[in-house]
Amino acid sequence: MTEPASSLLSRIGVGPKAPLRVPVEFDRLYDLAYNMWWSWDPIAYQLWGQIDAKAWVHNRNPLSLLLVVEPSTWEALASNSTFVELYSEAVERYDDYMRSTATWFAENHGEAPDETIAYLCAEYGIHHKLPLYSGGLGVLAGDHLKAASDLGVPLLAVGLLYRRGYFRQNVDPDGLQQHTYLPLELSRRSVREVLDSRTGRPLRVSVELAGRTVAVGAWRLDVGRVPLLLLDTDLPENDPADRPISHILYVRGREMRFAQEAVLGIGGARTIRALGIEPTMWHVNEGHASMSLLERMSWQLQDGADMATAEEKTAANTLFTLHTPVPAGNEAFNSDIARAYLGGTVEGVTHDDLLRLGRGKDEGRFDLGALAIRLSARTNGVSRQHSELVTEDWGDLIGGSADSITNGIHPQTWVGRNIERLFRRAIGPDWTQRVGEPAIWKALYDINDADLWRAHEAQKELMLRRLRGRLREQFGRHGNSPNRLRWIDDQLTPGRLTMVFARRFATYKRPGLLFSDRNRLHAILTNPERPCQIVFAGKAHPADREGQGLVRWIVEMTQSSEFEGHVFFIEDYNMLLGKTLVTGADVWLNTPRPPKEASGTSGMKAAVNGAVNLSVLDGWWLEGHTSANGWGFGESSDSDSADASTLYDLLESEVIPRFYERGDDGIPRVWIDTMRESMVGALTNFTAQRMVMEYVEKAYLPLASRP
């Protein structure tokens, strides 16, 4: 299949797909495997499991799966009418999706064959087999790309190909976090090398860093209709000391991090230009990519503009999204690093210019957030409250108020299979194409209570079964006895109220708040008539000693006589574990110290699956909370003890009683009412489709520079 002539995918030439032993009657599996669309389409996702269920569950990677299928399996599948029909349906859905010109963008904003929105970000959470993300920013960016594809928005994304990605987390018996970086096997990932249209050879651009020339290549990952260009320095022509620049996401060394972000920003802008693509607007998503603005400003200077005009023209069609709640959260470097690495790199930009444009709150620092604000026409925060904080902290640079576009999630990616079936029954099989229509979600009020409860219970039981499996792996690696491993079989029981706390471990997120009064918590969890259990998961950055200390402390709590069997820590939090948790939790717990949470999205993912949020009123929950869809607390408190006391009160007097209040049929109808309101509220107001629509209408099109 070929993409439409106007498609960005068709304008970026790539190398061949990996050779696979797929019979001709199923050769369209190549197309499906090389486009991440399969990961969020329910029919295409189901197809892979039908080829070889055991191999799929083990790997969940189409290319790895296709490499191990035996010829006899293909013969059996060819005579299996159910599989053949499923294959045909998946291919038809893919072709309809990719070829459709009746997208939201086209229908609402007309044909624009040359419209291109460049989107630059340091991390992307597309799928757990592509460890190009660390947490919220990356997963948000991945959902942004998927929603843009669904809506037909002409987005071209740029990031880095982290060949060793973000770390895998193991926790030893004492709770110490261990960090492992595994190499990414590119032949088994859906990426293809970008080619130079003039030579047919792999595309190369160069970035001068500290007096050396570093070659930068690119790989294309297809995210539906959206191409994601992943920049790579691990190339034979580079000095061995420069090849690892793009290896590790959020590498600890400050000079290496600076070099990495120079490759992302400067190399990203040069790669787009080398492809002959001229974006009509640029979206810098967090400060990591802000050096792209220096490169674009240099283009203006080389064309004869003076510095003031170059800055003005660069900013005119640029949007900067800030994801951190305070200036200290932005990427800032010692000015000597900027001097050493950028001297002579960006033509026409002197060291004095760098210091002026990158001057933030701290003298002597080169602040990438400040740089992006100065060279962008608009700056936005990712929730209403966050935008107010951005205005308060950066208003002098912004020259007014920051815009507000609240984050959202891509429901097709995060909804569990059982709840998705209810969506199909209530809304129709085309619900995946109608996510951006708020009115459709009213149909969820017509779902029978018993059906909703059964769907939730099925997802919860699957979650708990998977968690027990992961605990066996952890305990087995720690050398626990066979009896201890058998003990796990009786843990994480489905009938208990199950709360989940899963996110990056940082001090402001207060994972230990629930343990402020251990005696009171013990009484809550071990009540024989209304027992509860809590699942913790999350990583701390390798450089964050305090965060790692919190991981260790939580692990110690799981091993204490007070909480053993009621509190659990699951290691190696990633997108796969994240989806498992959001699809099965009863209560999603979030306890940040306000106003530190810029937005957050994990609670949205849990909500669309029927989980109920019990959260500090910060970030998105400050906007999303109502009296009917969950519980909020701590908006104005600056006291951990006061917040903990309120949290205990809510659990004892409202949350737990409502969950255990059952009718004669065993169904908690009042709780189900809360679940339903949670689902409808999140799906109506907090989807990535709504978010991307707002970006298009509030920023992308108003800022676009059209010929």
Image: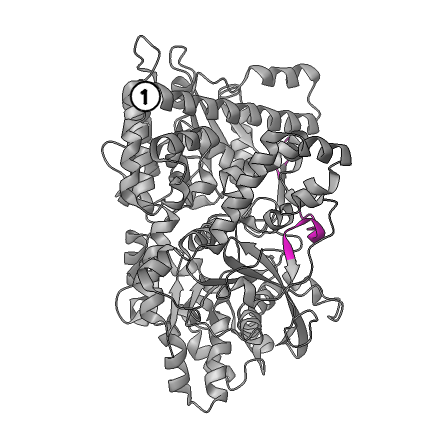
Q: Residue furthest bottom?
A: 304
Q: Quadrant of the N terminus?
A: bottom right
Question: Where is residue 614 drawn, in percent x and y?
Answer: 34, 33
Residue 101: say if magenta. no
Q: Which residue is mark 1?
A: 449
The answer to which image quadrant residue 322 occupies is bottom left
Callout 1 environment at 10 Å: few (<14), some (14 to 19), or many (20+)? some
Q: Which residues are magenta?
A: 171-191
Relative vertical location of residue 683 with respect to residue 379 in this rendering, above or below: above
Which residue is nearer to you in this view: 608 or 104? Answer: 104
Residue found 52% across the figure and 50% down from its top = 95
Q: Tell me if 604 is positioned left or right of 239 in this view.
A: left
Which residue is nearer to you in this view: 344 or 662? Answer: 662
Residue found 66% across the figure and 47% down from its top = 27
Which residue is nearer to you in this view: 371 or 155? Answer: 155
Question: Where is residue 593 drawn, in percent x and y?
Answer: 36, 44
Count the marks. Answer: 1
Question: Where is residue 494 drawn, in percent x and y?
Answer: 47, 18
Relative vertical location of residue 457 with respect to residue 509 in this rendering, above or below: above
Element marked by disc 1: helix
The residue under label 1 is which amino acid type? Answer: Asp
Can see residue 116? Answer: yes
The answer to which image quadrant residue 483 occupies is top right
Q: Quadrant of the C terminus?
A: bottom left
The answer to which image quadrant residue 246 occupies is bottom right
Q: Residue furthest top?
A: 664
Question: Where is residue 267 drawn, in percent x and y?
Answer: 58, 71
Can see residue 175? Answer: no
Which residue is nearer to you in this view: 495 or 2? Answer: 2
